[in-house]
Image: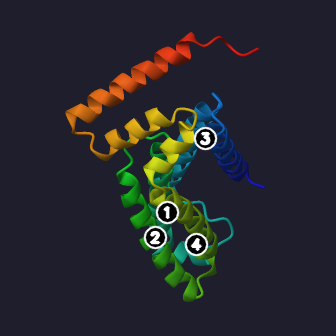
Amino acid sequence: MNTVILVEILLILLAIAGFVLRIGLSVWGIPLLIFSLVGLALMYFQRGVRPVRLNNQPTAAIDRYFMPAYKLGHFFFALCMLGVLFKVMLWDANFLGLGVTLTLIFVLFVSLQVLKEKVFFKKLLVKSILIGTTALVFYQAPLATFINIYYREHPQFAKIFIEYRKDPGNEMKKKNYLEARKKLLNKNAKQPPLN
């Protein structure tokens, strides 16, 4: 198996582990998520920039759609990975919708190429379906769900945070959120460490 594919699989497994740890409120969840999803995004971006390697696929080399589709698809994959990271980290992830839309349009294009019996598009189709579906699931998941999961031990703070995220321009909601956040951070700082 190719080293690049092994690294990609390892980063995907680390992203899954990081998400599980993030849900479990472990400190290692956030660094694992950031490392793995940024690593995947950089890997996909690099694949979109570098020349396409066509190992023993002469028909793919003469197809006028394969190389541009391969490069464009990997740019869309990188955008989706960054969007998923932003959504999971509760940052502003508006561009995830753009990444999902572009990836799903790309899936339709690649599907049409596979239907035309261009077999060298099959791997790209499978990868684009998996990444597009994952990004769509995270895009459709309400932000309030993530907030309630991450702050399940502090439901009052979660409620204030959700209200603030619904209308971040409201100064009163922002003030309430900042006060609740400060109380939560002070409360957590005063707790003795667990042995």
The residue located at (60%, 87%) in the rendering is 117
Whether residue 84 can be seen here: no
Q: Residue at x 60, y 60 (%)?
A: 53
Q: Earlier in the sequence, mark 2 or mark 1?
A: 2
Quadrant showing the N terminus: bottom right
Disc 4, SS = helix
Mark 1 lies on residue: 136
Image spot of residue 58 (x, y percent): 62, 75
Q: Amino acid at mark 1?
A: Leu
Q: Earlier in the sequence, mark 4 or mark 2?
A: 2
Q: Nearer the viewer, residue 129 or 17?
A: 17
Q: Which residue is mark 2?
A: 104
Residue type pointed to by label 3: Ser
How many numbered circles are shown?
Answer: 4
The answer to whether residue 142 of the structure is visible from this angle is: yes
The three-letter code of the residue at mark 2 reads Leu
Query: What is the CA distance from the residue labelled 3 to the residue labelled 4?
Result: 23 Å
Mark 3 or mark 4, which is nearer to you? Answer: 3
Quadrant for the C terminus in the image: top right
Q: Which residue lies under the disc numbered 3?
A: 36
Residue for badge 4: 125
Which numbered disc, 4 or 2, marks the residue closer to the eye? 2
